[in-house]
Image: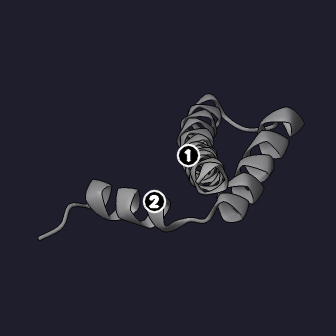
Amino acid sequence: MTSEVEQTAARDEALGYEQARDELIEVVRRLEAGGTTLEESLALWERGEELAGICRRRLDGARARLDAALAEEAETGQE
């Protein structure tokens, strides 16, 4: 059986950049609005960190793809 943590991790990795960013914006909005308990605030903070990591990985992947395409273009142009 797959654990709940593994299922959550798999679901999170399936999030696209825009989805993760939008959820992160909502988490920040809720934290800034206040009115949550300490436990709720900590849970929101942790979720925000997870979402920020997803966004970072998506952007790093996009940068790597762009760099590879530019390198390929530069090699093709030199021949």
> How many numbered badges does the structure rendering display?
2
Task: Give whichever of 48, 38 is nearer the camera.
Answer: 48
Identify the residue shown where x is 27% and y is 58%. 6
Identify the residue shown where x is 73% and y is 53%. 21
Task: Give whichever of 19, 56 is nearer the camera.
Answer: 56
Disc sitting over residue 64 in the figure: 1
> Which amino acid, by three-letter code, is at mark 1?
Ala
User: Looking at this rendering, what residue extends furthest in the right direction?
Assistant: 33
> Which amino acid, by three-letter code, is at mark 2?
Glu
Q: Is residue 6 above or below residue 25?
A: below
Disc sitting over residue 25 in the figure: none
| Quadrant, the C terminus | bottom right
Identify the residue shown where x is 21% and y is 61%. 3
Query: Residue 30, percent across and down?
Result: 80, 44
Classify residue 35 as left or right of residue 77. Answer: right
Q: Secondary structure at mark 1?
A: helix
Q: Is residue 39 above or below residue 70?
A: above
- Residue designated by label 2: 13
| Viewer-nearest of discs 1 and 2 | 1
What distance separates the C-alpha of mark 1 from that of mark 2? 18 Å
Nearer-N-terminus badge (1/2):
2
User: Looking at this rendering, what residue extends furthest in the left direction?
Assistant: 1
Q: Is residue 8 above or below residue 51?
A: below
Task: Give whichever of 47, 67 is nearer the camera.
Answer: 67
